Image (cartoon, coloured by chain):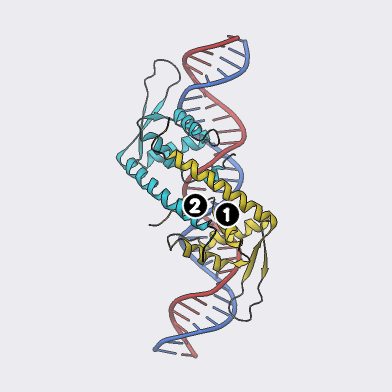
Chain colours: A cyan, B yellow, C red, D blue
Amino acid sequence: MDLSSDLLRGYTDSIILRRLRDGESYGYRINREISDISGGSFELKEATLYTAFRRLEAAGLICSRWGDEQSGARRRYYSLTEVGMEKLSEDMAAWKNTRSLIDRLFGEVEE
Amino acid sequence: MDLSSDLLRGYTDSIILRRLRDGESYGYRINREISDISGGSFELKEATLYTAFRRLEAAGLICSRWGDEQSGARRRYYSLTEVGMEKLSEDMAAWKNTRSLIDRLFGEVEE
DNA sequence: ACGTAATACCTCACCTGTCAAGGTATGTGT
DNA sequence: ACACATACCTTGACAGGTGAGGTATTACGT
């Protein structure tokens, strides 16, 4: 089952932040990890991913440096700032609330 | 805790459809119900709500009729079409998948 | 008589995030 | 030589959410 990214809109930033919580990483790898975790049912489009990096860096949630690869394509490495770590915590807490809210809104019994 | 509606974008349509599953209703009431269920932490903006009605009706998921209130403001009543009911079922199934995906993407242990 | 609030509907212009479609460059396998 | 994987990037169009505005009816207090 393919998941429409409309349903994940609003989570892209947090998903990327989460990928960086375990340490520095780069775009292509993050994208593959997300695709792997989702079992292929979802993947960020490149345009979305790189737009998100710009947004997150401008907001001071991540920072970047160019890698010094001796061979292969150059990579830009991103890492979480302290503000970014706090934001991630808030986002994960907000997710629990949102999840329970949507569950209730879709619930079988209310009123 | 206030929920950013960015996190709920993509669910507005389904949430409205769900409100109509128990029978005909109208905008103002639907909005109040959503607000009640969320305990006041979330409510659709009017512009969002009425935009959604247009969209859903154009898509053939709901249909509308003007009420014949003897007093008070006029109401436009909406109800689910068959296509709308099917769409709601699909949306609720998609939600379960999305929920589990985000849980995994936010998960503490993977790889 | 007048103002205010609740009910109930609506539209327009703007903003933001997604993404198709393009692009660049390096290294590996055939 | 050519395709493919890795790895990055930008532009323009599009869709949904929303602030700010609007209309109309009824009820209540002063």
- Which is more toward the observer, C24 or C9? C9
Tell me the amino acid under the disc marked 1: Ser
Residue B78 falls left or right of residue B100: right
B110 or A86, nearer to the observer? B110
Q: Which residue is mark 1?
A: B14
State the image coordinates of residue A99 (x, y, percent, origin top left).
46, 50
Q: Compare residues D19 and A15 and report the one nearer the observer.
A: A15
Vertical placement of residue A10 versus A54, above or below: below
Q: Nearer the viewer, residue B44 or C24?
A: B44
Image height of A32 relative to D18, above or below: above
Q: SS of the residue at dot 1?
A: helix
Label placed on residue A97 = none
Q: Position of residue A30 (x, y in %)?
A: 44, 31
Q: Nearer the viewer, mark 1 or mark 2?
A: 1
Return the chain for callout 1. B
Is disc 1 in the same subunit as disc 2?
A: yes
Which chain contains the residue that carries disc 2?
B
* Residue extending farthest left: A82
| Quarter containing the N terminus of chain A | top right
Look at mark 2 in the image and give the residue it sits on.
B8
Is residue A8 something one can see in this rendering?
A: no
Q: Quadrant of residue A72?
A: top left
Q: Is residue A10 visible?
A: yes
Q: Classify 10 Å Cα crowding around label 2: few (below 14), some (14-19), many (20 and above).
A: many
Query: How far apart are the alpha carbons under marks 1 and 2?
Result: 10 Å
Name the residue: 57% across, 50% down.
Answer: B92
The spot of residue A55 in percent (x, y) is 42, 40
Residue A63 against residue B43 in the figure, above or below: above
